[in-house]
């Protein structure tokens, strides 16, 4: 009955959530036509401190991605997108320089073509900033804080590393959620559904504990001033050599993670139709195609209400609300306290919208 969804949840998803398997490439193979992206990527944090960074990047030759050149095409395409996505966002959003609304053709054309292969808009999003942007210090150790670091950054501050890596650990913990979904789908009955809901509630509690670790290595002032501007949305940006009509794209945001949307789809949480729900649906375009399919399949799933007991069902909703409350708290202290423009990196009135999501989640408890 649910074979299509079950087949999507097999393999790496039940081991490492929605992180890629194998681990992301740390560099292109020796002699690759793309290895110059590794070099520029390493130098990008320092380069972006220079007034001439845009002129330098505009003069670089970035070869278009050609799968025929690669033996590990998918992994190399993801690394290519990470490197070039960071370069594009660094170019448009360079701190300390005048506003920029035109991405030069040498960056725009290869970025657009690579993103077309990935079936996503041409801007660095959550997948490139977090899901594909890590490596293990000990290749045999866990994917966990203390044993992971980032491949690419905008700044040299460890605060940015930490911000990304907290999200990576939250993502890998989500494997427990997907294992619970498999249990639920393989034995569609009250017993398995309730057991799975308890597992999901437990996983959300673990993810919340990780989210609470943000202040350990991330300063609100440095986040707001030093690297948040680089993950902002593109507003009326022309992609030279592709389309001269200015386009606006959503910036990197946790709303592009597939974890919470998957749970909303599973539980059928009824968020009131509004600009918020339209925005959340638009965020799916920035997710990897396979992740979008999982959410769509979960939306088609039979509602759990008739088989789920109130206690585990409400436990999931409460822990989801607590996770969102912690997110709202960090948004207040790391962003809202420092700004007059109360739009998030995705371009939204985040404070009002986050509170609405919390209220509607709790209102759905039975």
Image (cartoon, helix red, strand yellow):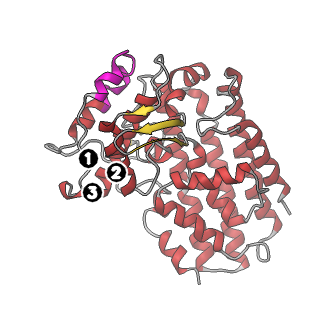
**Residue nearest the viewer, comparing 42 with 189:** 42
Q: Which residue is mark 3?
A: 73
For the residues labelled 1 and 2, the Cα–Cα distance comes to 8 Å
- Residue drawn 68% across the image and 69% down it: 195
Instruction: Residue 361 in the image: state x and y as whole percent.
Output: 78, 54
Of residues 143 and 97, the one drawn nearer to the viewer in this rendering: 97
Label 1 sits on a secondary structure element that is loop
Rendered residue at 64%/36% (across/down) = 212
* Boundaries of the magenta span: 41-58
Is label 1 in contact with label 3 (beta carbons under 8 Å)? no
Task: Tell me the quarter of the image containing the C terminus.
Answer: bottom right
Disc ID at residue 113: 2
Residue located at (27% from left, 57% from top)? 73
Q: Position of residue 267 (x, y in %)?
A: 72, 65
Label 3 near label 2: C-beta < 8 Å?
A: no
**CA–CA distance in space, label 2 to label 3:** 14 Å
Residue at left 35%, top 24%?
54
- In the displayed structure image, the side of residue 181 where residue 358 appears, left or right: right
| Residue topped by disc 1 | 64
Q: Earlier in the sequence, mark 1 or mark 2?
A: 1
Q: Quadrant of the N terminus?
A: bottom right
> Is residue 229 something that shows in the picture?
yes
């Amino acid at each position: 009955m649910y074979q299509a969804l079950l087949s999507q949840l097999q393999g790496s998803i039940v081991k490492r959530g929605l992180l890629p398997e194998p681990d992301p490439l740390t560099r292109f193979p020796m002699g690759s036509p793309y290895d110059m992206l590794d070099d520029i990527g390493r130098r990008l944090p320092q380069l972006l401190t220079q007034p001439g960074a845009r002129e330098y990047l505009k003069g670089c030759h970035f070869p278009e991605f050609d799968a025929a050149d690669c033996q590990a095409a998918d992994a190399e395409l993801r690394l290519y997108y990470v490197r070039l996505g960071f370069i594009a966002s660094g170019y448009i959003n360079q701190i300390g320089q005048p506003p920029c609304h035109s991405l030069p053709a040498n960056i725009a054309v290869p970025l657009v073509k690579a993103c077309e292969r990935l079936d996503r808009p041409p801007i660095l999003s959550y997948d490139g900033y977090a899901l594909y942007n890590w490596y293990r210090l000990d290749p045999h150790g866990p994917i966990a804080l203390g044993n992971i670091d980032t491949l690419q950054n905008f700044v040299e501050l460890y605060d940015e590393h930490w911000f990304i890596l907290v999200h990576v650990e939250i993502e890998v913990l989500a494997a427990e959620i997907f294992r619970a979904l498999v249990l639920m789908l393989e034995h569609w009955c009250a017993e398995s559904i309730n057991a799975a809901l308890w597992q999901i509630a437990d996983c959300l509690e673990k993810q919340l504990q990780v989210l609470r670790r943000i202040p350990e290595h991330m300063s609100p002032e440095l986040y707001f001033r030093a690297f948040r501007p680089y993950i902002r949305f593109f507003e009326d940006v022309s992609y030279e050599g592709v389309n001269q009509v200015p386009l606006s794209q959503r910036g990197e945001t946790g709303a592009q993670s597939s974890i919470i949307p998957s749970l909303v789809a599973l539980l059928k949480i009824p968020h009131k139709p509004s600009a918020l729900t339209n925005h959340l649906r638009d965020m799916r375009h920035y997710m990897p195609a396979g992740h979008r399919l999982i959410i769509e399949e979960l939306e088609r799933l039979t509602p759990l209400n008739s088989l789920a007991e109130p206690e585990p069902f409400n436990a999931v909703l409460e822990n989801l609300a607590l996770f969102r409350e912690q997110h709202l708290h960090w948004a207040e202290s790391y962003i809202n306290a420092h700004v007059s423009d109360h739009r998030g990196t995705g371009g939204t009135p985040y404070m009002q919208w986050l509170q609405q999501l919390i209220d509607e989640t709790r209102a759905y408890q039975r």
